[in-house]
Amino acid sequence: RPLHLAIIHEATEHALQMIKLSNNHPFLNLQNHQRQTALHLAVITEQPQLVEKLLKAGCDPRLADDSGNTALHIACKRGSLACFSVITQNCLCHLTSIMSFPNYNGHNCLHLASINGYISLVENLCQLGADIDAQEQCSGRTALHLAVDLQNPTLVRCLLDLGADVNCLNYGGFTAYHLTYGRQNEEIRCQLYERTAQELRELPDSESDESDMEDLDLSEDELYDDIKFGK
């Protein structure tokens, strides 16, 4: 795929020429063996100029790679503010569905930005209408639960300021405050304690409390990055 190669090798002029000649042609949406489109590759190689040209030429931002990530997911995961801005400005009609779309690990764009600690992307996503209380599909954690798992007080504060629901329960019946039990950060515990409903401050009665609390695999998206199928 000549366009893919041009993008990977950052042969910008060649890529721009091919994009210009392929306006609204299916060629733009060809996927490689990892199901990446030219748009995915332009984000991965941090080329926002090409991202914009591809979108304006008709590249479909809804297409997902073999991990279920759209180009916007990749931008959120990598912390690419430039590519994120270009995609969100040029995909207004699909933006709500793309932001809420879960990848194959159950994470949407807000979850990925939160897991990787990109505060500005979290703020931008919420301002663009992302559901701040959306639950990831594996264990029902919201971005706020994830922020506690990560022991990131800045992210916790940011999400609270943006209106995150402290009383939201994950699939195990835990609030974000419950996840502060056994963890070191007092700032996070204090921030959440005063906002959490009194009846939701005590841990739910369950023999599996500890195992549920410990089953926090935040690196799913990272673990599988280097495993490529179909080669």
Image (cartoon, helix red, strand yellow):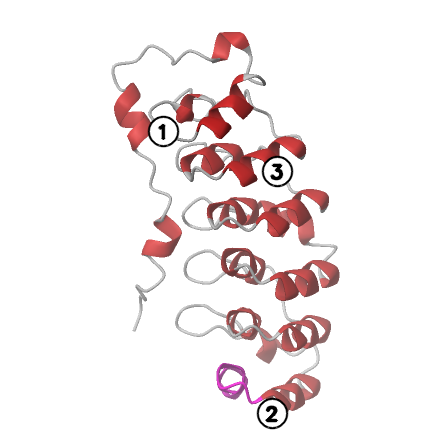
Which disc, if any, is residue 158?
3
The crowding category of the residue bearing disc 1, from other C-alpha atoms within 10 Å (few below 14, some 14 to 19, many at least 20), is few
* Residue beneath the point at 33% across and 27% down: 213
| Marks 1 and 2, how far apart at CA | 52 Å
The amino acid on which the numbered mark 3 sits, given as a three-letter code, is Cys
Residue 189 appears anywhere in the view: yes
Q: Residues within 10 Å of mark 2 (few under 14, many from 20)?
A: some
Three-letter amino acid code at the position of disc 2: His
Q: Earlier in the sequence, mark 3 or mark 1?
A: 3
Q: Amino acid at mark 1?
A: Arg
Horizontally, residue 222 falls left or right of residue 111, namely left
Q: Which residue is mark 1?
A: 183
Above or below, 52 relative to 63: below
Mark closer to the chain start, 2 or 3: 2
Camera-near label (2 vs 3) is: 3
Residue name at image x 57 percent, y 71 percent: 39
Marks 3 and 1 in Cβ contact (< 8 Å) = no
User: In terms of sequence position, does the residue under pointer 1 or pointer 2 come before the other?
Assistant: 2
Crowdedness of circle 3 by 10 Å Cα count: few (<14), some, many (20+)? some
- Residue 133 at x, y = what percent? 58, 32
Identify residue for label 2: 14
Q: Main secondary structure of the magenta part?
A: helix
Q: Classify 61 as above or below 203.
A: below
Query: What segment is highlighted magenta in the picture?
Result: 1-11
Question: Which one is nearer the viewer's eye here, 153 or 175?
Answer: 153
Q: Residue at x 32, y 55 (%)?
A: 223
How many numbered dots are placed on residues in this image?
A: 3
Q: Is residue 172 above or below residue 128?
A: above
Please give the name of the residue rendered at 73% of the width and 63% of the height, measured from the top-left corner: 90
In this view of the protein, which residue sits in the foreground, 32 or 130?
130
Element under label 3?
helix
Instruction: Name the element at disc 2.
Output: helix
